[in-house]
Image (cartoon, rainbow, N blue to C red):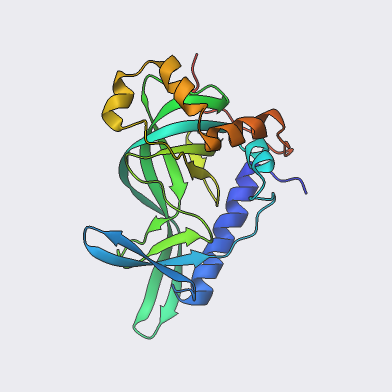
Amino acid sequence: MKTSMKKAFMILSIFTTVAILASGCSNPKIDKNITKSGEIPTSYIQASFVIDINNPKEVVGYADYAFVGLVEEMTGTDYKFPVTKETEDGPKVLTMPYTNYSVRVLDNIKGNLKKDVSIPIQKNGGLSDDKSEYFLNEDDLLPQEGKIYVFTANARPDGSMLVSGPNSNIEVKTDVFSKNSIQALSEESIANELTKTEEYKTYQDAYKNEIVKDRERFISKYEAP
């Protein structure tokens, strides 16, 4: 089924909002996120996707960019798609959180993003506006500061980048890197270390054998010249 990225975002956002409304901001599948303020429950939202999100070849083929990035900082949360729901205590406005991050690109797998600057990305999901719980797609997770992930991202019409859905950020398991040591390493040294990790190998192979989805595409404003 052909669909543009804009339509895909809209479908997912509408589906997400409906799911939140139907559950009354709750879901039978709930985990706990350990934070500085204690335990906060996470509600997982069921959503449908136009690709097999468990197949890296389809995930990379749908994405505009695939890259390895160090999460430098979580920079805040935006709240979108407000919907008013009637409750026993009166009307309540529900929104979908989108978490913002500053990321340093360590290596490009698909596309050519800048490596010499911090790049902002936005992840679908995050802490609710009343700080009472997290909302995430089922089987998804939020990136954490100081960790390295393989990201698959789509460019929006305005050139910003969205990371959305399960398997859109896969943690790279390596003890070699720390934030300080990465700053001291050359691009060649970083690339050499990354090629030793299973996550990098998996997504590099996926890109070589990607299953491309026919859809409208855009270019990130953080592309290298």
Query: Looking at the picture, how far across and down is residue 159, in whole percent?
Result: 50, 31
Query: Looking at the picture, how far across and down is residue 187, in whole percent?
Result: 42, 17
Q: Is residue 21 above or below residue 112?
A: below
Q: Nearer the viewer, residue 189 or 124?
A: 189
Taking the image as drawn, is residue 155 in sight? Answer: no
Query: Looking at the picture, how far across and down is residue 225, in whole percent?
Result: 50, 13
Query: How many discs mark residues in the rendered view?
Result: 0
Q: Among all residues in the image, which is located at the extreme right?
A: 1
**Residue displayed at 49% across by 69% down:** 20
Query: Looking at the picture, how far across and down is residue 162, in whole percent?
Result: 50, 41
**Residue displayed at 64% across by 50% down:** 54
**Residue displayed at 57% across by 60% down:** 14
Residue 39's quadrant in the figure? bottom left
Q: Nearer the viewer, residue 136 or 161?
A: 136
Q: Among all residues in the image, which is located at the extreme bottom?
A: 88
Taking the image as drawn, is residue 115 in sight? Answer: yes
**Residue displayed at 66% across by 35% down:** 206
Q: Among all residues in the image, which is located at the extreme left?
A: 37
On screen, residue 179 versus residue 88, left or right, reads: left
Q: Is residue 38 above or below residue 210?
A: below
On screen, residue 76 versus residue 7, left or right, reads: left
